[in-house]
Image (cartoon, rainbow, N blue to C red):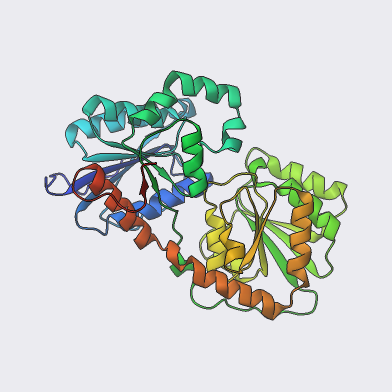
Amino acid sequence: MSKKNNSIVNRKKIFCFHVISSLSVRHGGPSRVVAQLVDKLACDDQFLVTLLSQKIFFDAVVDIFNERVSLLISESKFQIALSFGLPIRALINSEAQLTPPSIIHNHGLWQPANHWTASTARRFGIPLVVQPHGMLEPWALQHKALKKRLGMALFQRRDLETAKVLVATSADEYRNFRRLGLTQPVAVIPNGIDLAAAGGSKVERARTAGDRTVLFLSRVHKVKGLTNLVQAWAQVRPTGWRLQIAGPDEGGHLAEVLRAAQAVGVAGSIDYLGEVDGARKTEVYHNADLFVLPTFSENFGVVVAEALSHGLPVITTRGAPWADLETHGCGWWVDIGVEPLATALRQAMALNDDERRAMGERGRAYVQRYNWADIARQMADVYRWVLGQGARPDCVRLD
């Protein structure tokens, strides 16, 4: 366990706990989102930020670069202890007693770690912010539906209703909160992206005739719609194009995707790159000509913003809140299914390199609004409002 940076709390400051059940690099979006958010929040001198989590020994976690963030991770040798949230339960209770935070930001739902966090907030009377990170989306609720209905009845609804404010990353996610009968204020704040990682203009690699790439980069999970993409790829059977799939295999879904590709005769034009990160991830984006996310459900879809920041036109579905792709002329926003994906792929591949490059540059300009510094400022204003230290921000909806 790392040592806290701040042992004495200046009462004029805002002492903020952020809690997430896992910061593992294997768990994709939420881990990285939380890491980026706390990094930028801690740049504001008013905030003392502590990030609490748990992990199994030897599990790699995402990097926290800001030394002003106090990182507290409770470790266990036993996965079952993590499954019941026991390490983080002890950690958050002891920390809340030692140095009571001004506010707690709880990332995620359903996990015992999230429940213990809400319980601690109730016990000590600490204002709670809850950010579901897409876990209340319709597709997500249908996954293990019986278990989630039981969890909602036993503890999750009470934990949600404990929150002073909920955080949604899109208007669609906000509407889903309301459909579930959640009446608290909702701060609609998108996720940010690391614009610096994309660099400046897209680095163009030397291309030869018939040397083009469509990239999928995300978790290889059923929710991402990869089997639909394989079927669409088989319909289009593009000459001179390859499909690259990059990302961690979750639950063995990769084998299902590859079997589907073999069955429809396109396995020879599909490459699996494995999990990519850092410089390798940037290289994969720069070497692509088109990005596709055929998802069933996203509360935001960070990889869409990342792809746009790297100058790639994007195809995604109405399962992700990216209607602006078409509004800003930088991609296709299509119905979920094989036929719409195939149509969009044909249209994108029919463009010449200059036309696709122009779409990518429009996308790069559009996503500048998703820089983490601005996102963190919005979140900080929400905390101040909850604590009675500022006016209600424009991002907070009461309707």
Viewer-proximal residue, 10 or 232? Answer: 232
Does residue 160 appear to the left or right of 282 in the view shown? left
Question: Would residue 122 be seen by someone viewing this image from the given angle?
Answer: yes
Determine if residue 280 is in view: no
Residue 311 spot, x, y in % from top left: 58, 71
State whether residue 42 is above or below residue 198. Answer: above
On screen, residue 40 versus residue 45, left or right, reads right
Q: Quadrant for the N terminus, please.
A: top left
Which residue is rendered at x = 56% and y = 61% of the image? 324
The quarter holding residue 120 reads top left
> What residue appears at the point 25 percent right and 55 percent down from the top-left corner?
68
Residue 267 left/right relative to 110: right
Where residue 137 sits: x, y (%)? 55, 38
Q: Is residue 369 left or right of residue 122?
A: right
Residue at left offset 58%, top offset 36%: 138
Task: Decide: is 162 above or below 292.
Answer: above
The picture places residue 195, in percent across and down from the top left corner, at: 45, 67
- Work out which quarter of the rendered image holds the C terminus and state it: top left
Q: Is residue 56 above or below residue 216?
A: above
Q: Write down the quadrant of residue 334 in the picture.
A: bottom right
Q: Residue at x 46, y 30 (%)?
A: 181
Residue 52 in picture, x, y percent from top left: 33, 40
